[in-house]
Image (tube, rainbow, N blue to C red):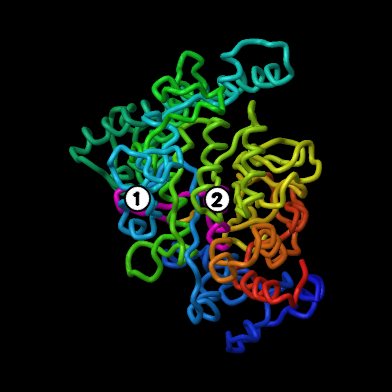
Amino acid sequence: MNIKTYLATSAFAVTLLTGCGSSGIQLTAVEYSGTIGPKNAELTETQLEHWGHEDLITDTIPGMSVIKAYNDILNAREGKKVIVGVVDSGVDINHEDLSSVIWVNENEIPDNGIDDDKNGYIDDVHGWNFLGESNDENLELTRIVKKGDDGSEQYKNAKADFDKKYREAKMGYDRYSQILEGLTKTDDLLKEHLGKDSYTAEDLAGIESDDAVVNEAAKMAQYWMERAGSIESIKGQLEEGVKYFGDQLEYNLNTDFDGRAIVGDNPEDITDTKYGNNDVIGNLEHALHGTHVAGIIAAVRNNGIGMDGVAKNTEIMVLRAVPNGDEYDKDIALAIRYAVDNGAKVINGSFGKSYSPHKEWVYDALKYAADHDVLFVHAAGNDSYFLDEEVNYPNDQENNGPEFADNVLTVGALNYEVNENLVAPFSNYGKINVDVFAPGTKIYSTVPESKYEYLQGTSMAAPGVAGVAALIRSYFPKLSASEVKNIIMNSGLPYTGEVIVGGDPNNKQPFTDLSKSGKMVNLYNAIILADKVSRGKVNL
């Protein structure tokens, strides 16, 4: 049976037969015709916390059918341990929901200052930190501009992008700072007038003053409270904006800043590998992103705390290589090779950039992963770009040509509404350069110091799919990385309607045209298809 036959015979069926013996999984895959009505009511807090695990048919929420897959199939089966390499900003390996699923290098004696396993990394018990003590960095385009005009097209493009981004950052910083300063003065004035440390909308409505400044302040505060709920909330959002643009000006776009100086290597030399350390957490504040990603993949399931990751039977290998700024090609290439050499079968890369001066190093690392049967799951990016015209590195082809390896799976982000808002407005897309879509809006997961938060981005969509891949490799270990990739792509659910693209209501396109597969990842279907492929019943 080929894949088309598999899909044709499974259309619209939801057969809940039991039995997982030698004859395989006796369940029928589910398809979505696009005719089932979406959930119009707001999601409850409980639903929102795990919406990415819900089932489209049963719950009318476009999750990956994780709960259904466990209940109907996986809970009755035993799988093998799978290591997932998380190339990111660092992970809080002491988190209450992660500490028991962190990979341990059993061939390394902790803290003895010796490279016991002779892999080139001393005391690498949980992975490796390729950034050392560095946290903040330039964007790659800033680094290109700093090197000076070499007459290349790359420099010309980078300089134009740098000038544009700098103007935008300066305008954003000034605007947010001015609004925050004005609102803070307004807030202080009203607190003094009312004689309170805080106030309500009713307090403001009751103000009748002979002082025009006070009356104007009350109107301004009412305006903001109607939009944000409280003055403290809007001040917090403004402070985040000031920090965001401030970081860009101080680090990302500052040609006088060199975040690499304290690392101690030559980032232009791929053979200079004696750098970094074994502190895979790094700075806890900077580890927020990586900790969130790790939780999406493998936070302990059904332990009564926090949230559930997608994959059980999974260990997280931590590769700290993504700073506050753009990652170095050298660090990414070496991190991928480390993961491959030390047993990872899936690697998650929730990072990306528009310039890659040493992209060949990363390409070679991805080919190395392919040669060793390792799947690389990559976030599509959050610029609302059409990636068949724009570039987001790392990728698996050049100039929309043929893929150089079939082990890279690029993931766009879904929203939780099954309507024209199905695709997250920030998500990149492309019929050639994005493979699938998965939940990426308001995803609840682990953050440092045993806390939990909502974050969003294709950075959150990719690890969900990495978790799906880990489960397939756990239960069907004989399947290759290429087969796992194609199973995930072919077993997803389509949406037949048009969706808003890039957050622009005037730009609506068929969802099926936004990725190579045209589908949303579905674990339930993926497990059923993986079973058929593993038993030779379906040819991909």
The structure residue drawn at horizontal position 73% and vertical position 75%, both measured from the top left corner, is 536
Look at the image and tell me in which quarter the N terminus lies. Answer: bottom right
Q: Disc 1 marks which amino acid?
A: Ile
User: Picture quarter containing residue 183?
Assistant: top left
Between 65 and 41, the residue placed more toward the observer is: 65
The structure residue drawn at horizontal position 69% and vertical position 77%, both measured from the top left corner, is 535
Label 1 CA crowd tier, 10 Å (few <14, some 14–19, many 20+): many
Between 244 and 490, the residue placed more toward the observer is: 490
Q: Is residue 242 above or below residue 254?
A: below
Left or right of residue 313, residue 492 in this image: right
Residue 172: image location, x then y, percent: 50, 26
Does 124 appear in magenta? no
The structure residue drawn at horizontal position 24% and vertical position 36%, both measured from the top left corner, is 191
Label 2 CA crowd tier, 10 Å (few <14, some 14–19, many 20+): many
Which residue extends farthest left? 195
Residue 39 shows up from this direction: no
The structure residue drawn at horizontal position 74% and vertical position 52%, both measured from the top left corner, is 514
Does 449 appear in magenta? yes
Residue 320 shows up from this direction: yes
Q: CA distance from mark 1 to mark 2?
A: 17 Å
From the image, tell me which residue sits under label 1.
Answer: 93
Of helix, strand and loop, which one carries label 2? strand
Q: Disc 2 marks which amino acid?
A: Ile
Residue 259: image location, x then y, percent: 44, 23
Between 38 and 187, the residue placed more toward the observer is: 38
- Report the span colored magenta: 444-468
Residue 222: image location, x then y, percent: 38, 41
Count how many numbered circles sit on residues in the image. 2
Residue 280: image location, x then y, percent: 38, 42
Left or right of residue 485, residue 239 in this image: left
From the image, tell me which residue sits under label 2.
Answer: 347
